[in-house]
Amino acid sequence: MPHGQGPQGPAPSVLDLLDPAEVNKRASIVPPAEDQFQNVCLVEGAVAAIEPIIMSMNVKDMLKFKKSFLRGLRAETEGKRSDWERFVLIRVDAREGMSMYPRLLPDAIILIDRHYNSLKPYRKGECNMYAVNKDGACTVKYVELAGDQLVLRPHNQAYPIEVMPIEEGSKAADSLIGRVSYVGIET
């Protein structure tokens, strides 16, 4: 008789003791249904900074995020942002990436929640990383308010702290594109 076989065929295995439906449910490699994902547009930083609605001509790529992940992100909106497309992605350039190293790297893709433009900490005791509209372009920094100026603080101390005046008649939140909610780095 071959090894591992009994008189009636193959020897029983541990899997024979389990419910086949339960095994199949846990072993499935079928991706979740398409409706569980939301497309998020990858755009230039300047587009993310000023365009409430992203037009197709400005879309460089689309990435999919689980809807449950996006729904789980808390909004903290100051001012009128309800008509802004909430989530956008940008690719961080070399300077921005290195200024926030090791939290970011050059060419990282970041998810920006444009409905979180408050300086309130998202998590108690942690600094939020923001995409900031600086002269019509996008910079990524930690942000603090000092009087009528925003202090843009890099994570990497080799880069300078920048001070940005808040325009007269504006609020700090007007300069914040949104909170960085996710960082994707290719390896």
Image (cartoon, rainbow, N blue to C red):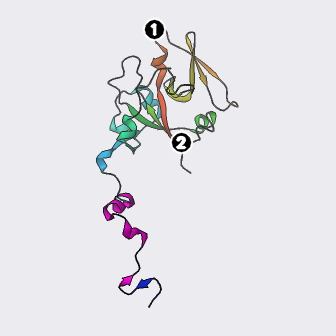
Q: Residue 185 carries which label?
A: none
Q: Give the labeled residue for mark 1.
A: 169
Outermost residue, front side? 7
| Amino acid type indicated by mark 1 | Gly
Give coordinates of residue 39: x percent, y percent. 35, 42
| Amino acid bearing label 2 | Ala
Question: Which residues make up the magenta segment?
Answer: 8-28
Which residue in the rendered view is the most extreme toward the right?
158
Residue at figure coordinates x 35%, y 30% from the top left: 85
The answer to which image quadrant residue 68 occupies is top left
The residue nearer to you, when weighing 112 against 175, is 112
Look at the picture and state if 113 lies above or below 31.
above
Q: Is residue 25 magenta?
A: yes
Q: Give how far across and how far down residue 141 sits, in percent.
A: 57, 28
Under circle 2, the secondary element is loop
As measured in the structure, the alpha-carbon distance from the residue carrying label 2 to the one carrying label 1 is: 34 Å
Rendered residue at 54%/45% (across/down): 185
Q: Name the residue under label 2.
A: 108
Relative height, residue 85 to residue 56 (above, below): above
Q: Which of marks 2 and 1 is in front?
A: 2
Please say whether residue 55 is one of the residues in the magenta stretch: no
Residue drawn where x is 55% and y is 10% of the image: 148
